[in-house]
Amino acid sequence: MPDLSIHSFLPEAKAYLYENKFLDVPNWDPNEKFSVEALGQGEYNMNFLVKQGQSTWVLRVNTGSQIGVSLPEQIAYEFNTLKLLSPSGVAPIPYFLDNSLKFLPYGILGMSYIRGEKLDYNRDNEKAARLMARYHQIGVPEGENHLIREELPLTLTYQRCLRMMAVYLESDLANPNFRDYLIEVRDWAGEARHREIYYQQDPWNCIINTEVNNSNWILDREADTIHLVDWEKPLWGDPSQDLSHFRVPTTTLWKTDYRMSQSDKTLMMDAYKKSIADPHLRDTIEARTRLRDPFNCLRGVSWCAMAWVQYQRGDHLLKNPDTYRKLSMYVDIDFVRGLFDPFIKENTF
């Protein structure tokens, strides 16, 4: 599989815009001069900044799916989520969808550009908590949205982890000691996941992002605004997923050296609860979130173990040197023991 980088793909992005004249973008004139530059690259997406006069927007190119669907379905899933969120102002505004794969072999959407900088864990946790509370309370009828249902929250995460970690466990590249410990964690989680009955007996469903790491938040400090910009794998499920994912070490350490202290967690959770109108959710969100923490850690470690093997084999489409360095950290047995030993030895959340 060829190495695909955002800079090598820039000519194709420009050619797409020259070829497709009737894009539904505010103040966009395809017959006038415009510029395109690389904005940012993730593991499954490339984002390009398009400028023309007063019009500045993002061309998003999707190269893979994390929810197990085809490229046309994946980009439509994200586009429809942005449409659902559009009235709330928490995410980019979607402009157009192109999942034909005719001109380029990837899914494409156009969306608004949000200026700012990424989230700083040392000062923005409470702002993020308030925004999560905001989109968690968007009124969406239970059966009238396209989102995948999180029917069995812990089992869903566990099963995804099984598929991801199998890539590592079955690889001849695996470290034997780490493989053995990963199997021990897998078996523990297989038993602990049955505690998801909590969510079944006391459901509180809403839009959840599932990818709330710091690089997906954009803050404009002058305008005092905050947005969450990556919506490629949201679900219809319990709000504790986002809160847990935001605070666990596998998330905060992914792009930074920050690890949330207990006092940091308290401030974050208090900010969330103060922004929640439903008294029952305020009273139960701590317990809901604690149940999630080890499973979100397992999710991060399993994905990294899988991706580490893929990088080694050369079959990961998008290559990022910083990502590979963190992958190596997340398959270090001492680091992973520090995450899971407390849960395995105490058998408690």
Image: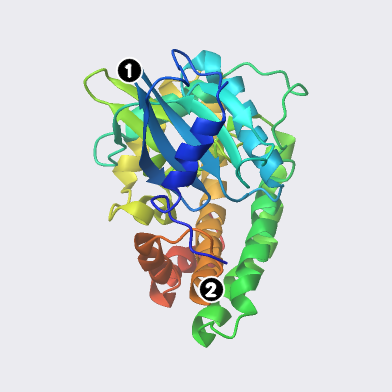
User: Disc 2 designates what residue?
Assistant: 309
| In the image, residue 55 above or below residue 116 | above
Q: Nearer the viewer, residue 267 or 70?
A: 70
The disc placed on residue 53 is 1
Most extreme residue toward the front is: 31
Quarter residue 118 falls in: top left
Q: CA distance from mark 2 to mark 1?
A: 45 Å
| In the image, residue 167 above or below residue 39 | below
Most extreme residue toward the left is: 222
The disc placed on residue 99 is none
Q: Residues within 10 Å of mark 2 (few under 14, many from 20)?
A: many
> The N terminus appears in which quarter of the rendering?
bottom right
Q: Nearer the viewer, residue 17 or 192?
A: 17
**Disc 1 element:** loop
Q: Residues within 10 Å of mark 1 (few under 14, many from 20)?
A: few
Q: Earlier in the sequence, mark 2 or mark 1?
A: 1
For the point 57% across and 20% down, the residue is 22
Q: In the rendering, at what x and y percent does residue 97 appear?
A: 62, 29
Residue type pointed to by label 1: Gly
Q: 265 left or right of 147?
A: left
